[in-house]
Image (spheres, rainbow, N blue to C red):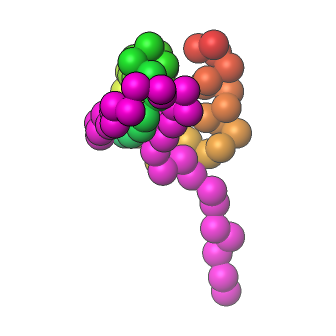
Amino acid sequence: MSEAVQSRVAGLLGVGFDTKDGHVRITQADQYRVLMGSGETHEALQTICRRIEESVQAAGRTLSDYSPEEFMELVQELY
């Protein structure tokens, strides 16, 4: 017998594409990574990821506890 594999959220990745200053910005946290972007974009992506991470923690869960559908519901509630 084979068990069905369920999709789960492994982590968050935010990538900014608007950098023009040549600065390489990388932020690493337990549940997310933010790469590149202008200072403003990088900060905005960090804020989004932190807010999602805090909501997940407040629910007593980890990202891997969420199916993609559940994760999208969470994000829609936040934004």
Q: Nearer the viewer, residue 15 or 50?
A: 15
Which quadrant: the C terminus? top right
Residue at left offset 68%, top offset 27%:
73
- Find the residue positioned furthest to the front: 21
**Percent coordinates x, y for residue 39 in the rendering:** 39, 18
Residue at left offset 64%, top offset 75%:
3
Residue 67 seen in the current view: yes
Query: Magenta residues: mostly which secondary structure?
Result: loop
In the shown orientation, is residue 10 left or right of residue 25? right
Q: Is residue 20 above or below residue 79?
A: below
Q: Nearer the viewer, residue 42 or 4?
A: 42
**Percent coordinates x, y for residue 40 in the rendering:** 44, 13
Q: Nearer the viewer, residue 18 or 54?
A: 18
Which quadrant: the N terminus? bottom right
Residue at left offset 60%, top offset 25%:
74
Which region is colored magenta?
1-30
Residue at left offset 52%, top offset 31%:
16
- Find the residue positioned furthest to the bottom: 1
Q: Nearer the viewer, residue 62 or 28?
A: 28
Residue 55 seen in the current view: no
Q: Place residue 47 in its image quadrant.
A: top left
